[in-house]
Image (cartoon, rainbow, N blue to C red):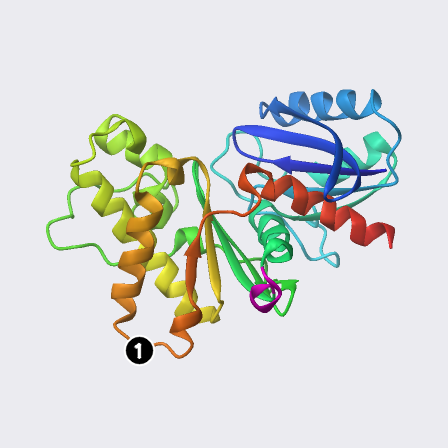
Amino acid sequence: MLGGIEAGGTKCVLAIGSAPDRIEACVSVPTRSPEETVADILGWFARQPRITALGLATFGPVGLDPARDDWGHILDTPKAGWSRFDLTGAIARGLGVTVAVETDVNAAALAEAGAQPHSASKSLAYMTVGTGIGVGLVLDGRCVHGAAHPEMGHFYPRRPAGDTDFPGTCPFHGDCLEGLASGPAILARWGATLSDLPPDHPAHGLVAEYLAQACHTIFAAASVETVVCGGGVMGAPGLLERVATRARELDAGYLPGRERHLVSAPRLGTRSGIVGALTIAAGLSL
């Protein structure tokens, strides 16, 4: 039996299954302080059949280099109380199993790559737009790591003429992509979620513009075939279509392979992250 955890800024999804696509039990618990959250996680798994390996797909930044002392630790994060917390170690010690760790968006990208038609399964990005904005990247069937992991939610998009008053909400960068187009940024700027704003509200076009710039940048920089857009903000009616249309316009007929570029909704729906966590656990058990 495999275990999986999708640790998000708002909630953690916990699951066990005999395979990534055969989930036997699944539950979500709120993400509170590190100590409270780990206690909830350990308590739930203690009530389940014993697992042999666990995949942790966590919000970041997170240490992914096993040669460093901060492997498996949450790094500097705006989420209060979580910076430098050894999440992976706390779970591994508490459950007595080997834990593999990956970013939540890299894990989701891995799961979505496995759910794509064969021809599009080796190069894919997963962009989640919710409490924050994160991008996971799979090239040649493997998650991309470097000095750390991709942090595309914190690049600086081009701001349209006249859109200069809002300073952005990112505590590190102000008006990076996350500071301009995440759920909290939308709420801070317009006092409502994107789904609750009228269809003719200018927020729809502006958020779509910023997210389309991100998609175009990913296509240009990484040459992926597909950018999968998930997360709560993407549930706003018509947003995905706006983003896809504007991304094509931004390309202006230039990028090679553009006929294969696709902006799409997750094939796995809301389960991309947890399926990705179980996929990582399955790799440990091979």
- The answer to whether 74 is drawn above or below residue 117 in the figure is above
Report whether residue 157 is seen: no
Q: Is residue 179 left or right of residue 57?
A: left
- The answer to whether 103 is drawn above or below residue 36 in the figure is below
Residue corresponding to mark 1: 254
Residue type of the residue flagged with mark 1: Tyr
Task: Tally the marks.
Answer: 1
Image quarter hosting the C terminus: bottom right
Q: Which contiguous range is marked in magenta?
A: 117-121
Q: Which percent across, then down, holds residue 170?
A: 36, 41
Q: Which percent across, then down, holds residue 234?
A: 39, 40
Q: Which percent across, then down, holds residue 277?
A: 69, 44
Q: Nearer the viewer, residue 139 or 88?
A: 139
Classify residue 50 by image quadrant. Answer: top right
Residue beneath the point at 66% across and 20% down: 36
Report whether residue 217 is seen: yes
Magenta stretch, main secondary structure, is: helix
User: What residue occupies the far left of the structure in this picture?
Assistant: 162
Residue beneath the point at 61% across and 42% down: 273
Q: Is residue 91 left or right of residue 107?
A: right
Q: Is residue 110 left or right of residue 248?
A: right
Classify residue 60 by image quadrant. Answer: top right
Q: Is residue 276 magenta?
A: no
Q: Is residue 119 magenta?
A: yes
Q: Nearer the viewer, residue 243 or 241?
A: 241
Residue beneath the point at 21% across and 54% down: 159
**Label 1 element class:** loop
